[in-house]
Amino acid sequence: MSITISPFLVKVILKLNPFRCIFVMCKGYSEDYDNFTELVWEDDKDLDFTDRDTYPKFQLWFIKYSGYLS
């Protein structure tokens, strides 16, 4: 499942995502305009996500786990 989010929420969610079952994805990252790329706080915390030309669309992707986590 995916949900489109605003650039304002991107950094907040990246920083406060302790369980890693929510992924922040960006279309246009590294000039890949066809696919979404996962953003990671440690690598992407200094990016300017309000630049709509460089980062045109963000989504949250939820991963549903079935069974126990090992």
Image: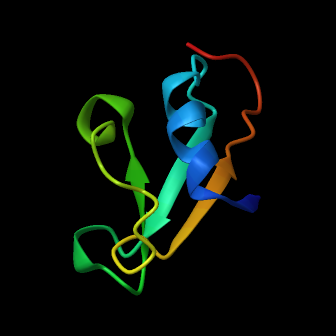
For this orientation, the residue located farthest to the top is 70
Q: In this view, does 66 lie to the left or right of 27?
A: right
- 16 above or below 58? above
7 is higher (above) or lower (below) than 52:
above
Residue at x 77%, y 33% (from the top left corner): 66
Number of marks in the rendered image: 0
- The extreme bottom residue here reads 34
Measuring from the top left, give residue 41's x and y in whole percent: 37, 32
The N terminus, quarter of image: bottom right
The image shows residue 3 at horizontal and vertical percentages of: 75, 60
Which coloring applies here?
Answer: rainbow
Between 14 and 22, which is closer to the camera in this rendering?
14
31 with respect to 5 (left or right) = left
Position of residue 31 measured from the top left corner of the image (x, y, whole percent) = 25, 79
Q: Height in image: 23 above or below 54?
A: above
Residue 13 lies in what quarter of the image?
top right
Residue at position x 48%, y 76% from top?
A: 56
Q: Where, by quadrant of the figure, is residue 42 drawn?
A: top left
Is residue 69 left or right of 39 when viewed as pictured? Answer: right
Give above or below for 19 relative to 38. Answer: above
Q: Nearer the viewer, residue 50 or 30?
A: 50
Q: Is residue 1 left or right of residue 6?
A: right
Residue drawn 33% across the image and 74% down it = 54
* Image location of residue 12, percent across then percent down: 58, 32
Viewer-closest of 62 and 51: 51
Quarter containing the C terminus: top right
